[in-house]
Structures are given as structure tokens and as C-alpha cells.
Image: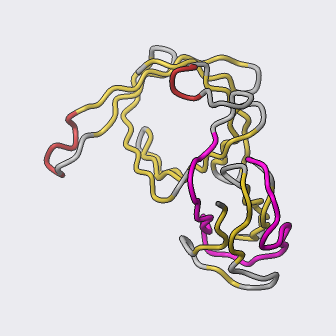
Amino acid sequence: MKLEVRIGGRTRTVELERAASHAALGREGLLLRLDGREVAADAVEVASGTYSILLGGRSLEVRVQPAADGLEVHVGGEAFRAQVLDPRTWQAKRGGALEAEGRQQIVAPMPGKIVRVLVAAGDAVEAGQGLLVVEAMKMQNEIRSPKTGKVEHLLVAEGQAVNAGEVLAVVA
């Protein structure tokens, strides 16, 4: 699959291809070409929108969330805005942003503490709207809604400690 990705005003060509490099493990790896340069990669989605990626020997946790103008990508404590220029894959019904469908469980991407609750059960929310703020490793991360809908359940309160993968809220 070939995509063009715009990050920080720069457009990069990304090509992904399945590779049999992990055949002994019973799964396939990825061959990644970034602007024509080959990089060995392996990616696993560990939670909705959260990926564990081995890229050129480095381990990264990457969170991808829909944003009004494309995607918001969080890597190593930094946030980037990205636009994937492949309309067949990423353009959704509204404004080109990726939006989840159906009932969505919002999970903690890492262990931390809830420092702010921005919505209440029953509130209507838009895709990309902030729901909660989780503090982990002295950094605050806003957890956003993956879809337009209604907050069905809010399972945490301010000051509460949470574990990675713990369900924080449900948006339907």
C-alpha cells in the first residue's frame, strides 16, 4: 500500500508491504519504505488507536486519534498533526477525519491518574472532543472521543488512579 502523509507541512511517501520476516513466530512483519528508504518494522494494535511499533530496532508506543484536519499522532510524549493523502483509506464522511462507528470503549493508554473529567454521562460529544485528562509520568494526556455520539457511561472520577487498558468511558 502506498500513501502520502503530510506532517508539519512536509509530505512524505510511505509504502507498506507485508514481509515474511516473522514466519517463525507465525505472523508477518512489515517492510516500510519511507521516501524510498527501506526500514524494517513490526506493528501490533494493542488497544483501539494505540500501536506498539518496532521501527529500525526502536520500540515505540504510538497513539492515533482523529482530528478535525486529519489525525493527531502521539509518539514519545510529543504530538503531531498528520494528514494521510489516500482518500480510499482515511477519508470519512465528515471533513476527512477518521471516525469510529458503533459503541466505543475509551481505555487508558497507560497507567496514570485522572486529573480532569471534561464530560458527564449523558453528554453529547463530537469526534475528537476531549473527554478526560490523564496524567502519566508527569505529562498530561487528553483522551478524546473517537466518534460523535453520547457518553453512555463514565467509569472514573478526578483523582482516581487507572491502569493501562482500563475502561474509562463508553461512547455510543
Instruction: State the image quarter where residue 114 is shown.
Output: bottom right
Instruction: Give me the residue at 40% from left, 29% from top.
Output: 39
* Residue closer to the observer: 40 or 49: 49
105 magenta-colored? yes
Image coloring type = secondary structure
Instruction: State the image quarter where residue 38 is shown.
Output: top left
Q: Is residue 83 above or below residue 159?
A: above
Query: Is 134 positioned to the left or the right of 27 in the image?
Result: right
Query: Is 44 positioned to the left or the right of 60 in the image?
Result: left
83 magenta-colored? no
- Tell me where residue 161 appears, x and y as whole percent: 69, 84
Looking at this view, name the residue that lies furthest to the left.
Answer: 24
Instruction: Give me the residue at 43% from left, 21% from top.
Output: 15
| Quarter of the figure that contains the N terminus | top left
* Residue closer to the observer: 156 or 41: 156
- Tell me where residue 172 appears, x and y as whole percent: 64, 60
Range drawn in magenta: 99-127
* Residue closer to the observer: 8 or 134: 134
Instruction: Give me the residue at 51% from left, 26% from top.
Output: 89
